[in-house]
Image: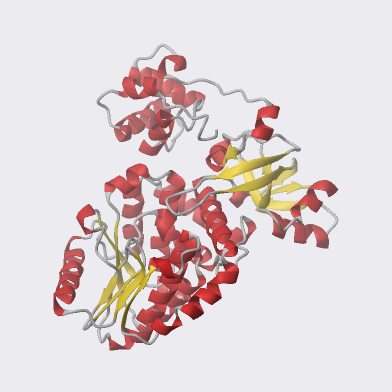
Amino acid sequence: MTGGDRQPNDALRTARGALSQATLADQVNAAIYRATGRETVITAKSISDWERGWYSWPSADVRMALCEILGAPDAAALGFFKRRTRRAALETSPLVLPDLISGRGLVSVGSSNVVRVPDGRFFAGGELVMHHCIADEAGRGWLMINPSDGVTTSLRRTDRWSAVVTSDADGKYYVSDSRRFARQTGRRTNRQPVAAANVVDDLTAGIIWAVVNTDNALLADDAQIEASQSRLGHYVEQSASMAALNEVPDLELVTRHWLGSSFCSRHISRHVSRLAQEPFFWTREQSGEEASSWLLWNHKLDYLRYTSKRFAGMRRAFCVPEREIDTSPQYEKVLLLLTMALMEAFGITVELTTDSSLGPVEGFVIASEAIAANWLGGEELWHVDARPERSRRAAYQDLSDELAANSVIASDCSAARLEWMADYLGVSWRWFRRRCEELAVAGIDGIVQPRSRHLSTRGLDAAVRYVAHIHTIEGSCLARC
């Protein structure tokens, strides 16, 4: 459903009354289990999506449970309705990426459909052309398809994002990156596999959302990135500097963030030898959109590898207030959880505060000495200082001590920290682990491959592999090598 078509479901919101979304979700899960014996994962986000009108016709089990709990005579009394869209309308009104999650999409078999990739606070949004091919065989872990010559030719176009999508008997969609698929087709003449791990859900949708938006922005500014870095090069040797946004006025916001992040990473790496103890890092990313930079930007992965080899016991704290959770779609929350898994994969202990008053605190590192480095949420491209004044160092130390004592997800066990973070985000840990296990085998590149030289899926692969094997290996053994 497109944003313009979406209408809030006031009837469901009114019927819910004083019940919280989380309480209602728990009751729905319990009612379905009593009636069918099946376990379901309805969350507060599911209720929120229905109330906001993202989905107008949940499954029959859910409709039955909601009517029973809320005392409604039928689904219509709760504001639910079937959405009938003609094919002609599909051709003029792009689908939205979340519509494909859990088989809720409207992609016609044998057709090519434009799917709108949503925007965000920094992301500008984009479009993805999906070619729907019939799966003529479904095996263990794979669906086999044989695309037509016309589809294969279209997949080789380099001027747009495209993908192959197929579906199974349950109406779930599976996606494959167009360029990888086209290369395979060029080498073979028979049917091609699409991994069952590539099912379109909140995990794969989040990955596609982040890659398409970030890649579009960096490619749009590719010719200017090196010129901008050269123009800003006089800041490199300064121990403290602040670059104004108007020094790169024509760049996309994502590219400005990339430049600021790259400079801050290099600044910390140049001065990290001054830290004689295991450091505490304070990071300003509060949402999956912001945190996806750790998963995709090459320089951030190299920075994690460099610092983690130097220090074996780092801590990194995130501030994620409840309001961020309330306003984030589920696929964005999954990206935030993946980012924290990546940190743990490098042997970094993740800590969490939900205190919104700490959100404006600038990024920093503190141990025996302190380094300030901030590129996100400020009024400048970056602000760095290798020797911040005593009052700032004292404030940094106080925050480090506070998180050491009162992290919301405090535990000696990495798996427990991530599981508690998943619980806070409203993400099913059991589902998340299972999906990471599946994608650890299939690989992320089968879903979507970045085109920009500044991006890769290495961080995503490291994160999903760590979660997949979290009970059998140490994180430092996985990511530092």
Q: Position of residue 234 (x, y in %)?
A: 42, 84
Q: Position of residue 197 (x, y in %)?
A: 59, 51
| Residue in view at x 51 percent, y 64 percent | 296
Q: Nearer the viewer, residue 311 or 34?
A: 311
Q: Is residue 431 visible?
A: yes
Q: Position of residue 80 (x, y in %)?
A: 47, 21
Image height of 239 relative to 131, above or below:
below
Image height of 74 relative to 124, above or below:
above
Q: Residue furthest top?
A: 73
Q: Position of residue 192 (x, y in %)?
A: 76, 53
Q: Dividing the image into 4 quarters, which one contains the N terminus? A: top right
Corner quadrant of residue 361: bottom left
Q: Nearer the viewer, residue 7 or 340?
A: 7
Q: In screen coordinates, is 136 left or right of 459?
A: right
Please tell me how many numbered marks the rendered image carries. Answer: 0
Q: In screen coordinates, is 162 left or right of 283?
A: right
Image height of 423 relative to 319, above or below:
above
Q: Is residue 281 visible?
A: no
| Residue in view at x 79 percent, y 47 percent | 151
Corner quadrant of residue 200: top right
Image height of 323 relative to 336, above or below:
above
Corner quadrant of residue 416: bottom left
Q: Nearer the viewer, residue 401 or 451?
A: 451
